[in-house]
Image (spheres, rainbow, N blue to C red):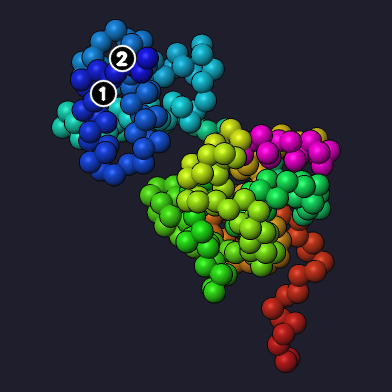
């Protein structure tokens, strides 16, 4: 039985829907604030910043929740305080927990090739290929339709990606050939990737996760590999080929260049292959 939200959380939900937040973000924020209310046994409108900080401290230390989850709580309570209750938000009193600086897992070109080439199922192979070759997030892959594939300009239109932003990213000729093969074999009705026997529905996130994990095992990769690993690898491999960082930022849909610049630490540039600009001068 689906649990109903309290009146205060319903007000938060309405405000976020009005501001056109994604369904996923609305659901996540409402869920976190419901848990906050239940933990404190008080309505959201009666809770204070001090109580929020104590609650988050408990989540981080006793429950071992991630800093991302803690920050979700802060963001949700901030929206409720400012835009629902129309109270001033004192940012100085609520410092966000510092995120651990972890380098993402990245595959070599040969490892990605092995994952794809050892996957015989055409739909699964197309999923891996498109996710890697276009640098897509998992949800962006699930939402793809045939109308998003621009074979004239060799681009993929990503509609309403993270932050409700549209963007274009690369369409590889090899990926296009595989997509056409997948289309002939599987005949998707609405979305490019649909579950067997359920035309018009999106393949599930869990299914895509499983495809990636099984392909990694088949390729004998002893690494913690996820869908996002393919996206990280796409960005790193483009950098190693000398593609401009700003352009990679556009392909990935990052708001800040700082997010994209972390891939600079993962590249395998050989300094001996880099020439000084002086070498091109006639002096």
The answer to whether residue 163 is magenta is no
Q: Quadrant of residue 52?
A: top left
| Label 1: which secondary element | helix
Q: Determine whether, in the image, residue 130 is placed left or right of residue 51.
A: right
| Magenta stretch: includes residue 211 | yes
Q: Is label 1 in contact with label 2 (beta carbons under 8 Å)?
A: yes
Q: Which quarter shows the N terminus?
A: top left
Image-quadrant location for residue 204: top right
Image location (x, y in percent) of residue 279: 75, 82
Q: Measured along the vertical axis of the image, is residue 4 above or below residue 80?
A: above
Q: Image point 37% across, 23% down: which residue? A: 31
Highlighted magenta segment, given as a residue range: 208-221
Q: Give the dominant element type of the magenta stretch: helix, strand or loop.
A: helix
| Rendered location of residue 111, percent (x, y) | 79, 48
Number of other residues with Cα within 10 Å of mark 2, as a class: few under 14, some 14 to 19, many 20 or more: some
Q: Is residue 46 left or right of residue 230?
A: left
Q: Is residue 51 above or below residue 253?
A: above
Residue named by callout 2: 37
Residue at screen point 38% across, 26% down: 73
Q: Nearer the viewer, residue 220 or 65?
A: 220
Quarter holding the C terminus is bottom right
Dot 1 corresponds to which residue? Answer: 9
- State the residue at coordinates (73%, 75%): 276
């Amino acid at each position: 039985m689906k649990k109903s939200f309290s009146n205060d959380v319903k007000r938060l939900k309405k405000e976020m829907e009005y501001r056109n937040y994604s369904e996923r973000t609305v659901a996540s924020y409402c869920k976190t604030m419901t848990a906050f209310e239940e933990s404190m046994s008080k309505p959201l409108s009666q809770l204070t910043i001090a109580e929020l900080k104590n609650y988050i401290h408990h989540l981080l230390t006793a429950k071992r929740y991630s800093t991302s989850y803690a920050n979700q709580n802060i963001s949700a309570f901030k929206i409720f305080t400012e835009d629902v209750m129309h109270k001033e938000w004192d940012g100085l009193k609520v410092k966000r927990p510092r995120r651990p600086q972890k380098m993402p897992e990245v595959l070599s070109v040969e490892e990605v090739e092995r994952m794809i080439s050892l996957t015989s199922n055409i739909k699964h192979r197309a999923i891996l290929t498109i996710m890697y070759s276009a640098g897509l997030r998992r949800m962006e892959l699930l939402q793809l339709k045939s109308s998003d594939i621009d074979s004239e300009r060799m681009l993929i239109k990503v509609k309403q990606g993270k932050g409700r932003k549209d963007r274009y990213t690369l369409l590889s000729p090899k990926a296009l050939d595989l997509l056409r093969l997948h289309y002939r074999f599987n005949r998707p009705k609405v979305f490019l990737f649909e579950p067997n026997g359920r035309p018009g529905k999106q393949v599930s996130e869990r299914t895509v996760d499983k495809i990636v994990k099984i392909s990694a095992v088949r390729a004998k990769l002893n690494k913690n590999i996820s869908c996002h690993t393919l996206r990280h690898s796409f960005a790193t491999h483009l950098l190693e080929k000398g593609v401009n960082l700003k352009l990679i930022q556009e392909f990935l849909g990052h708001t800040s260049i700082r997010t994209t610049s972390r891939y600079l630490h993962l590249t395998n540039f050989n300094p001996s292959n880099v020439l000084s600009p002086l070498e091109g001068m006639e002096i």
